[in-house]
Image (cartoon, helix red, strand yellow):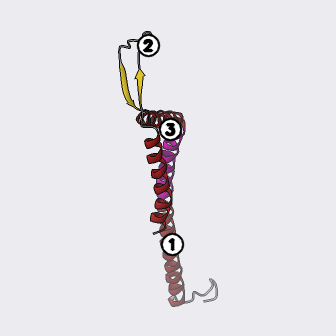
Amino acid sequence: MLRKIATLVIVVPLAAVIIAFAVANRHAVTVAFDPFSTANPAYAATVPLFVLIFILVVLGVIVGGAAAWLRQSKWRRVARRLDSENRRLLQELSATRERLVTETQRAAAAEAAAREGAKALETRRAEAPALAPPGTA
């Protein structure tokens, strides 16, 4: 809802200004593309002034956008390199975590086996008859 209101607040006055500009500048102008012959140009076009100004504004936006896009190519290249490095490091981290979990499980299993072995040894000692020291028999 707020976006619609903001659009109306911006677009409606802007449209009014553009329409007023077009109405005020609707007289025809001749645009010649021949710098050598002003009396009889090779190519000339007669258009309303507001059309000429709008075309030049659109061309300026396109040229400015292209220049900014070309200027930012270095940053896009750096971003792609950092993104690939980030993905590689995340894969390495995942592999290391899996290895750590496996090692932890293996250590826990070894510890449990050692405890079982110690219990079995104690059970055998308790069940085994006590041996008399040599020479006392």
The local secondary structure at tag 2 comes to: loop
Mark 1: amino acid = Ala
Magenta stretch prevailing secondary structure: helix
Q: What residue sits right under mark 2 in the picture? A: 38
User: Which of the 4 image quadrants contains residue 22?
Assistant: top left
Percent x, y for residue 107? 51, 68
Q: State the extent of the magenta-drawn residues as a range.
A: 75-94
Q: Quadrant of the N terminus?
A: bottom left
Q: Quadrant of the C terminus?
A: bottom right
Percent x, y for residue 94? 47, 58
Name the residue at 50% across, 35% down: 64
Q: CA distance from mark 3 to mark 2?
A: 48 Å
Work out which residue is located at the far top of the displayed protein and give it. Answer: 36
In-image side of 66 versus 45 (left or right): right
Name the residue at 38% across, 30% down: 47
Which circle, 3 or 2, is nearer the viewer? 2
Mark 3: amino acid = Arg
Height in image: 7 above or below 135?
A: above
Q: Residues within 10 Å of mark 1 (few under 14, many from 20)?
A: few
Name the residue at 40% across, 36% down: 51
Q: Is residue 89 magenta?
A: yes
Q: What residue sits right under mark 1 in the picture? A: 108
Identify the disc placed on residue 77: 3
Name the residue at 46% across, 53% down: 91
